[in-house]
Image (cartoon, grey):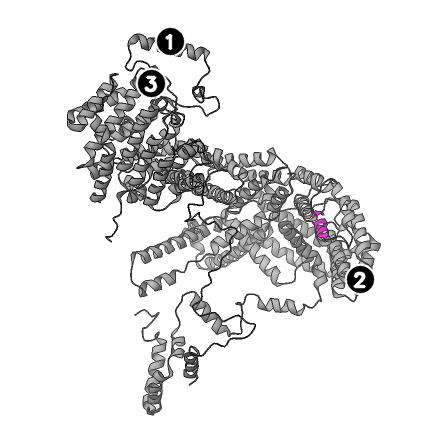
Amino acid sequence: MGSSNKKKKEKKKDFNKAKLKVGKAKAKAASFTDTSFKSKSITVNQQSLISSSLTPLEQFKQHLSLCISAKSDTARRDALAYITKHISSPSLSSQISIPLILTKLLPLLTDSASPVRTQLLKLLASLPAGSVPPHASQILLYVRSGLTHLALPVRLTALSALEWLVSVAGPSAVSCPGGWLKTLTSFSSMLGWNPSVSSAMASKGWSVGIKPVLLGKQNAKKGEPEAKARQLEVLAKFIHQGLKDEYDEGRTAEQGQGEADQAYWDNLYRLPRTPNPFAYLNLFGVPRDEENEMYLDRDSRARVFDAKWRAVIEKGKEDARKEGGAVGRAAAALHRALNGGAVVVTAAEGGSREEEDTEEDEDMKDDE
Amino acid sequence: MPKRKVAALEKVEADLVSLQYKIRRDPRSYAQEFYDQWLAYDAQRQIFISSPTTASSEDVKKFHDLVDMVAHVANLYPEITSPFPDHLKELLNQHHAVLDKELREKVVGSLVLLRRKEVIDSTSLLTTLFPILISTPSKTLRNQLYTKIISDLRESNSKTTNHKLNRTIQTVLHNLVTSDRTSSKGMWACRITRELWRRQIWTDARPCDVMKEAALSDNEKVVIGGVRFFLGGDKEREEMDDEASDVEVDLKKYKHQGTINKKTKKRQKAYEKAVDKIKRQERKKQSPHPLNFSALHLLHDPQGFAEKLFQKHLQNSKNKFSLDTKLLVLQLVTRLVGLHKLTIIALYSWFIKYLTPKQTNVTSFLASLAQATHNLVPPDVIEPLVVKIANEFVSEASAAEVAAAGINAIREVALRQPLCMNETLLQDLVEYQRSKDKGTSMAAKGLQSLYREVYPELLQKKYRGKAATMGLRSGEVKLRKYGEEEEGGIEGLALLAKYKEEQKKKKAEEAMEAGKEKGEDDDEEDDEGFNSDDWEIGSTDSESSDGWISVSSEEDDEPVKKKARTDSEVPDLVDLEAEAAAEMERLTMLATTTILTPADLAKMQELVREAKIEKAMGPQSMSKKRKELIDKHIEDGVTADDIELPAMLGKKATKEERAERAREGKPGRDEHKSTQAIKRSKKEAEGKSSTNKEKARKKNFLMTIGKARAKNKRSLTETKKRLTAHIARSKSGGRRRNGVSI
């Protein structure tokens, strides 16, 4: 039987010693896998462990790139922490450019890991106050994309960032292109006070419950009242910033009048000190619509606010006031802001903000 | 270490997809969520637009996802998303060169998606995509755009022809070709037009006009695109049509599978689909064939077009096109000249310098020359060319192939314009039938037989042959003068008239017989006046009562003819001729005196078909053959192969050629293997099962040995029983009774 002979041979073959021959390559094993490949270029990510050989600037840059490229949350957070620590160090501050750092790091505002976002807020807070206003519009774009993010924690982070922005660069935040109306739209959408949705739907004969469904389900028990209070609070600050008279904070009417006169003369005879002082002319950009327009002074802001948003926000505010509790208090602050008064936020509230955020995040995790 | 909890947000990232799903199911309840995401999209878009080149990959990814989500549900919230299409268009128009590859693909895909959801219309989609198609440097984007454009045009023309859209796009293409004649952007117009022509989406004159402009462009590539369209576009279209109808659905297979396999919804659907497809195919077969004119026939002003082509690309000495391109253009020009019988006198003198054996692709030039000849070309224009071919190609000293090609080219020219020849030259050429080379002699014989038919006076008497000599004497063979055309008629009309006459005769005879019987049987009844049979049969009967006159007249004629034939020849011929003319007149009367019914037309077609078959079976008349030959070339044009053909005669194929021919259409053979083994391995590779025979063959010997031994021990009766059972079983389809309905 030929086949069995053949099989015998085959079986034996496994145990025969492979003969090596001079001048010939060693026979490849049966399980050999070819791992060679061809490529036009090979990129190896910077992974050097030796940090001492790098100059401080190089280390800084390395961490900056780590913030974006690192896969693990902790690595990103640590890199951010490093940058937070060193950004204001005198040796580096002359060499690094704030705009570059902002363009690189702002996308992290909607990062999926809450420690990273918290760290980013800290980093923002540590930026030198004077360097922020020129970039207010850019920061505001990211804030807006965060305000209506799918996830509630990200929205809250964006709120905190907005609060910081209003406190550091309030005037430029409310007067940059799209900064006033678009931010208000985002706010109202976030709070579920949205007239455009209901009007769009109503025209089709739909009646709409404008309460957000997704968030309502997830956070009805725990997070929502606090979140809503927080939203109202930041909205109140933002509106206050937008509607306050530029020159009368804590001054008498005469002083304010005097400064206003000073500003008038400065405007006429002094060189402008802000970057891009003629931005409102929009000489080289695409034409802006009403939403994207710059509203430079209080009057124009108040005008569009009254025309578009006041009714909606008043109504929402009244509803919120009736709720009482933290929401009611925030609504009261909003009420004051709407009527041109100062927003008084208790120190306790301001201090515990960060902790609240993280707690909420953890709550969410627990829910899952 | 405890198992790591999945953070809420990591899920959230994927939640855009689930949100999309929820929105689709219940758009009302999720309007608020959608609006949030719309705002997020808007913010993200502004981030992106503020610096499209330096946008971080994170941002791009986010934007990509949001665009995807919004595009999928945009039709549900038309008021909120009204600016969305414009955003996408703007993005694509301004930043297509710097956009991230995936994002760019997504934006294009989203636009097409919006079109499919009827948020935007085809015109706006195509007018957006088209400018990018011709301006982008990226190959992948171009491919994507091209396929999208073609598929959208197909889609919008699928139910009914969308004339408005077609006209818009054709105008765009036309403008593209004509606006800048030196740029190669016209290639895209060529590609799109050709593709849509091939798919029979565009079949009218406008795409031909676009291609005409392309052929007149200054850019070589565009010219080639346009010219190739005219030369090969129609053939391509036919092939495509055949391919589409070739796909046969095997309904039997599905039925059979249905009896064997488990019955699932999927199988049921597949079966229904197959039935539907077959029905559609049948409907298509029965529906009248769409009358598609060829591109060459749809041209406006072919004379102007051919003249321009010739002057611009061929006659112009500054033109730097390659020879291949020039040949293509020449083919088109000559095709046009031959097909529409145009007159471009300068073309023929232009040919002269190319008619030497050393010219590359000279056979193509010869074929073009033949193509450019028709009966309205003045003979004195062509004669020098024929003389030149004869001098350059046909001599004892030249190679056999050259001589054969030369004579054959002359024959092709003479076929179309026989007056181009003079007596001495023809005699000289005809002498070549004595050549030793088979190709040359066959070519010369072909020339001779051609002239025997069209112009036998030109041949020496000894070469005229019997038929031609007889024809000359009887005056049957007549030289057609320059510009003379054959009289036309309705094809098959004579046949129909003859058929009708025969039918009439038959009926008359029947009626006569019936009348005789009637006359014998019931004369009295007939006289009484009222006859029910008469009324029922109606008009035919009454006709036959009139018709007896004609019958009798023909019967009278016949004996007269017989008498005439016995007389001398000359009056006979004259008589015959006159009779034929009278016959012809009588036949054509049918068309002028009666209205042909559809039944008549159908009958006429049938008769023509029969007559053709009869002719094909028997010997064919030369003039018909010639006409068919010319007709064929009007359809397909003369090619270089036609000219080279006689030179191939009598040449043995080399071994390689024979081997190549033998290998054609056979499975590839890398190693030495039996055909069976190749088939089997192919089947295995396709994932098909083995047959029972193969299984039996592979079966282990030890497993069969018991049965084999038992077989030896069987008694004779037992063996017989087994054998009869085996036969019965195999007749009824094996143990399972396969393929037999019980």
Which dot, 1 or 3, sits closer to the camera? 1
Q: Main secondary structure of the magenta part?
A: helix
In terms of secondary structure, where does tag 1 sit? helix
- For the point 42% across and 68% down, which residue is it? A31
Task: Name the residue that disc number 1 marks.
Answer: A261
- Determine the image quadrant of residue B209: top right
Residue type at tag 1: Asp
Left or right: residue B394 compared with residue A4 = right
Q: Extreme right residue here?
A: B424
Left or right: residue B551 compared with residue A89 = right
Which labelled disc corresponds to residue A269? none
Residue type at tag 2: Tyr
Residue type at tag 3: Arg
- Span shown in magenta: B364-378
Q: For the residue carrying disc 2, how many other residues have a C-alpha within 10 Å: few (<14), some (14-19), or many (20+)?
A: many
Which labelled disc corresponds to residue B432? 2
**Residues at badges 1 and 3 in contact (C-beta under 8 Å)?**
no
Q: Position of residue B151 (x, y in %)?
A: 46, 44
- For the point 29% across and 39% down, which residue is it? B23
Left or right: residue B378 compared with residue A143 = right
Task: Name the residue that disc number 3 marks.
Answer: A301
Q: For the residue carrying disc 3, how many other residues have a C-alpha within 10 Å: few (<14), some (14-19), or many (20+)?
A: many
Q: Position of residue B261 (x, y in %)?
A: 31, 64
Which dot, 2 or 1, sits closer to the camera? 1
Subunit that carries the residue with mark 3: A
The Cα–Cα distance between marks 2 and 3, rounded to whole angstroms, is: 103 Å
Q: For the residue carrying disc 1, how many other residues have a C-alpha within 10 Å: few (<14), some (14-19), or many (20+)?
A: few
